[in-house]
Image (cartoon, rainbow, N blue to C red):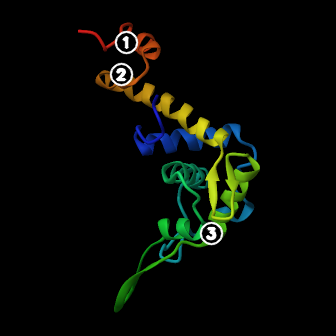
Amino acid sequence: MVTALEVPADKLIEKLASYLKENVPEVKPPSWVQFVKTGCFKEKPPEDPDWWYYRAASILRKLYKAGKPVGLSEFRKEYGGRKRRGGRPERSYWAPGNSIRKILQQLEQAQLVRRTREGRILTPQGKALLDRLAIEVLVDVAREKPELAKYLPESIQVKILGFTSGGS
């Protein structure tokens, strides 16, 4: 079985972001999202108008990858960055927590994430969504590069290639 960790992360996050935008009404950017920067170490707000969905998809993948409860401060560290401070030495800063917190709350409303005492974890629905989209991503990648079709289940290999790649 193909999991979300076995496919290219950029393609999975892109597909998951478009899925969240089209099919999950609970995840929607607030009105202030076009004005906010994603960190004090950034000069401008993101240019992509759909950055909210990409960040939500990235958070879902990070929760899947962790496999254990993840708190807000861990996400703030993960999305933080380096700030150049002119003549003074640069240092790292955490990302602001408001947008990450709002995304996690929206994912909780969509029942893709659950809150525990230790942090947030992925629900079985969230895990199933990521695994289902991972198979779709691998099918798309296998169409571009047929040598990757051997990692797909045989029933899907037959649909893509017309034969299985398991035999000699």
**Element at label 2:** helix
Q: Which residue is mark 1?
A: 161
Mark earlier in primary sequence (3, 2): 3
Mark earlier in primary sequence (3, 1): 3
Q: Are the residues flagged by discs 2 and 1 in contact, CB closer than 8 Å?
A: yes
Depth check, front residue: 36 or 161:
161
Identify the residue shown where x is 52% and y is 51%.
67
What's the distance in space between the residues labelled 3 and 1, CA to CA?
46 Å
Question: In the picture, residue 151 is in which quadrant?
Answer: top left
Q: Which residue is mark 3?
A: 36
Circle 1: residue type: Leu
Circle 2: residue type: Ala
Identify the residue shown where x is 35% and y is 25%.
144
What's the distance in space between the residues labelled 3 and 2, CA to CA?
42 Å
Q: Are the residues flagged by discs 3 and 1 in contact, CB closer than 8 Å?
A: no
Say above or below: 40 vs 14: below
Depth check, front residue: 110 or 33:
110
**Element at label 1:** helix
Q: Quadrant of the C terminus?
A: top left
Neighbour class for label 1 at 10 Å: few (<14), some, many (≥20)?
few
Image spot of residue 79 (x, y percent): 50, 65
Question: In the picture, residue 165 is in which quadrant?
Answer: top left
**Element at label 3:** loop
Circle 3: residue type: Val
Q: Which residue is mark 2?
A: 149
